[in-house]
Image (tube, rainbow, N blue to C red):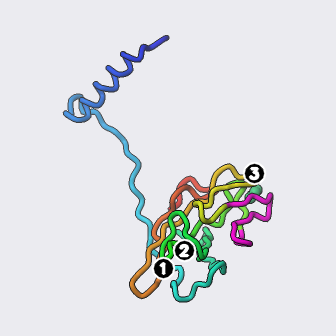
Amino acid sequence: MVVSRRRVVQVLGGVTMASLTGAGKAQFWFAPSLTYPAIKVGNVNNLKNNEPVYFNYPDARSQGILVKLGRPAIGGVGRERDIVAFSAACTHMGCGVQYKGGRFLCPCHYSMFDPAKAAAVYQGLASTGLPQIQLGIAQNGDIFARAVNGLIWGRARNI
Ligand code: FES
């Protein structure tokens, strides 16, 4: 059966109007917004450039890596916008990535991720970047993990 573009627009318009007016008792399901725990993962005064700090987030089964790059990064926090954190689970098959030589390196099949570019993959078998962990900094310099952008490898949901 061929459905014209006009018919699709008519149907979608009708559904939209029904949902706005309540006509026909149309119900729509929306994904619930997930509330992430805020967990302290470090302090800016204890970080040194290119020395990673490992922590678990959002739960004990998921390792994350916090690193101060010494250069601005996408999603970076701190005075120099250079502090970032990511899930350490490689997006190829879940091996734990390591921070070496200014990049994230997976020891299993050697995928490499750029920490300054939201951990975009630039070499290897992984097809997507590492999920970035959103950070916040308190006035005393404590760094908190607040959420995860993207799905951690092997999970149907992060929390
Ligand atoms: S598990 Fe990381 S590249 Fe395969």
Pair 2/3: label in front? 2
Sequence order check, earlier mark of 1 and 2: 2
Q: Residues within 10 Å of mark 3 (few under 14, many from 20)?
A: some
Label 2's element?
strand
Which residue corresponds to mark 2? Answer: 83
Sequence order check, earlier mark of 1 and 3: 3
| Three-letter code for the amino acid on which mark 1 is drawn | Ile
**Quarter of image, ligand 1:** bottom right
| Three-letter code for the amino acid on which mark 3 is drawn | Leu
Label 3's element?
loop
Gap between marks 1 and 2, in whole Å?
Answer: 9 Å
Which residue corresponds to mark 3? Answer: 125
Q: Is mark 3 within 8 Å of ligand 1?
A: yes
Looking at the image, residue 40 sits to the left or right of residue 12; the answer is: right
Which residue corresponds to mark 1? Answer: 143
Looking at the image, residue 49 sits to the left or right of residue 38; the answer is: right
Q: Are marks 1 and 2 in contact (CB under 8 Å)?
A: yes
